[in-house]
Image: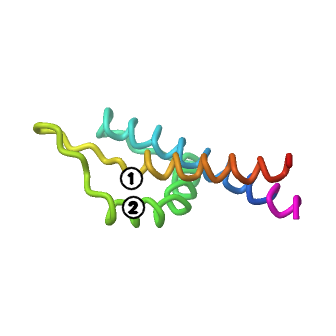
Amino acid sequence: MTLFFDILGFALFVFWLLLIARVVVEFIRGFSRDWQPRGLTVVILEVIMTVTDPPVKLLRRLIPPLTIGPVRVDLSIVVLLMVVFIGMRLSFDQVGA
């Protein structure tokens, strides 16, 4: 059973890293609107977006953006990062127990 939780924790860790990479990419795209990735970067970004898109889109439908004056803040990625982190902690705690 510890092997199951170890694999689950590792998979959640990899997904968490992909979510962090998605946040970085979205910041870059937000600050540099004319940025066009080329070559291997396109392949890497496609993998990141393909893996992280379904849960992010689901949470974007469930959690409305927070409106602060003229600014709308998307909390879906923050919530997903917290849920994945808690899942990682729980699975790694099961391995250590």
Calculate the distance from the C-alpha at mark 2 to the C-alpha at mark 1.
5 Å
Image quarter (top left, top right, bottom left or bottom right) of the N terminus? bottom right
The x and y percentages for residue 16 are 60, 48
Above or below, comparing residue 61 to residue 91 in the picture: below
Above or below, comparing residue 61 to residue 13 in the picture: below
Q: Are marks 2 and 1 in contact (CB under 8 Å)?
A: yes
Residue 85, magenta (yes or no): no
In the visual, does 62 lie left or right of 66? right
The x and y percentages for residue 28 are 40, 36
In the visual, does 84 lie left or right of 94? left
Which one is earlier in the sequence, the residue at label 2 or at label 1?
2
The x and y percentages for residue 65 are 25, 51
Residue 12 figure quarter: bottom right
Viewer-nearest residue: 97 or 73 = 97
What is the secondary structure assignment of the residue under circle 1?
A: helix
In the visual, does 29 lie left or right of 42? left
Tell me the residue that label 1 is attached to. Answer: 76
Above or below, comparing residue 28 to residue 46 in the picture: above
The residue stretch that appears in magenta: 1-6
Residue pictured at 32% horizontal, 58% vertical? 63
Residue pictured at 39% horizontal, 52% vertical? 76
Magenta stretch, overall SS: helix
Residue pictured at 27% horizontal, 43% vertical? 73
Q: Residue furthest front?
A: 97
In the visual, does 86 lie left or right of 25? right
Disc 1 marks a residue whose amino acid type is Ser
Residue pictured at 52% horizontal, 46% vertical? 82
Disc 2 marks a residue whose amino acid type is Leu
How many neighbours does mark 1 have within 10 angstroms: few (below 14), some (14-19), or many (20 or more)?
many
Tell me the residue that label 2 is attached to. Answer: 59
The x and y percentages for residue 96 are 85, 46
